[in-house]
Image (tube, grey):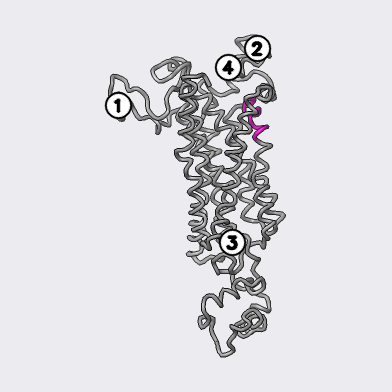
Amino acid sequence: VWSEDHWDRPGYVNGKRDHLFVKPAVNGGGNCGTNYKFTLLNCNRPHGRAFHVAWFAFFACFIMWFAIPPLMVTIKKPKCDADADFCQPQGACSISGSRTQEILAGDYNAEYTDWSEYTDKVYDKILKDKTCAKCYPYQKGNGKGCGGIGLSKNQILVSNVVSVSGTIIVRVLIGPLADWIGVRYTYSALLVMFSVPGFLASTVTTYEGLVVVRLFISLVGGSFVITQLWTTVMFHSNVVGLANATSAGWGNLGGGAALAIMGAVFNAMKNGGMTNDQAWRRSLAWPPAVLLATGLVAFFFTDDCPFGNYGEMKKRKAETQAPAVDDGSDLQGGAEPVSVAGRSLKVAAANWRTWVLFLVYAFSFGVELVVNGNIALYFSNAFDLSQGDGGLAGSLFGLFNVFARSLGGWMSDKFNEHWGV
């Protein structure tokens, strides 16, 4: 059990952990050479548990946030109508039907009795026709067959823009909320509540429904703020840059993982005999389930900070101390706030450095969100890749987070060590 007796033991300063990947080994023995011990996989409460739950929760949020783009090749397809008259054996889209003759024009051959007698290029004209495509619920391929909700290019664009809009609002509000009620309550509530629109995504049947669901899903982007707050209160200033960057980078890794995994899950569903419509809907069901489970783990098995949970700390402080002066110094020093949630926002907004970071972040992470939301469909359209291959190629962009952000955090710690910035 973590107690005040442990706050200044080797590897900790005032209760905060001063290492992430390795720490000096006791008596010179360790598993990372003779003088260091590998500690990254340590999941002990409160520090190790908070770090790993933080990055994994952020990772799960990113997967759900960007689970739809790698499936957009299928979702944009027209709705199926296999029972319509034009899809019947003697209907307009049959091999001898009027619509088939119109589409194929000079390629049409009345003597053919099976589609296999046509070349793939000619057959593709039927599969991509807006009317006849509705007769092929199992057909894979970009622009072929049916099973989506019927989206135009402009509708896809609007949907992608909306999918990153909600995070702007929630990130402003969720920081003060976490200051007020604690990281554990805030993170658990976010994960559990916003798993609901994730589940609803698999039920949408219209463009309007998709836009609304993606707007609410984008609110999980607030998980970044809580992740950074959590590692900040758990790790000492000499390593907090590396801890923040690693937890955020491994969380962002979920964007790349979503692009790679969702296409593979869809293909597995298809290989199991599902239609396009069934496959993409079931593929979207597992990310929110992971989010829900992670929310429960965060609530029952983690702590707000090294010194306990905020609720307990406030009770102890109220019993032993007079009310603190409301001058904002406690927030700037990194201590647990004693006043209303909005104070942290006020202090941050009054500091010019906040706005410099705002611009830097907008032109870095903001671009990353746009790329993650569009790159899979772009590769599929521009290079005629399958849905799975387009997502896999696009995933390479997000997967660089496995090391790139940690590198930036390490550099930040070094700058702070030498120049105080």
C-alpha distance separating marks 4 and 1: 34 Å
Mark 1 Cα shell of 10 Å, populated few (<14), some (14-19), many (≥20): some
Q: Which sits earlier in the primary sequence, circle 2 or circle 4?
A: 2
For the residue carrying disc 4, how many other residues have a C-alpha within 10 Å: few (<14), some (14-19), or many (20+)?
few
Q: Residue 419: image x %, image y %? A: 50, 19
Q: Relative to 11, is 138 above or below?
A: below
What is the span of residues highlighted in magenta in the rendered image? Answer: 171-180
Q: Which residue is mark 2?
A: 324
Q: Earlier in the sequence, mark 1 or mark 2?
A: 1
Asked whether 50 or 143 is in front, the reply is 143
Q: Amino acid at mark 4?
A: Gly
Q: What residue would you read off at disc 3?
A: 74
In this rendering, which labeled residue sits more in front, label 1 or label 2?
A: 1
Q: Is residue 140 visible?
A: yes
User: What is the CA distance from the residue labelled 3 to the residue labelled 2?
Assistant: 58 Å
| Residue bearing mark 1 | 30
Marker disc for residue 333: 4
Q: Position of residue 403 (x, y in %)?
A: 44, 38
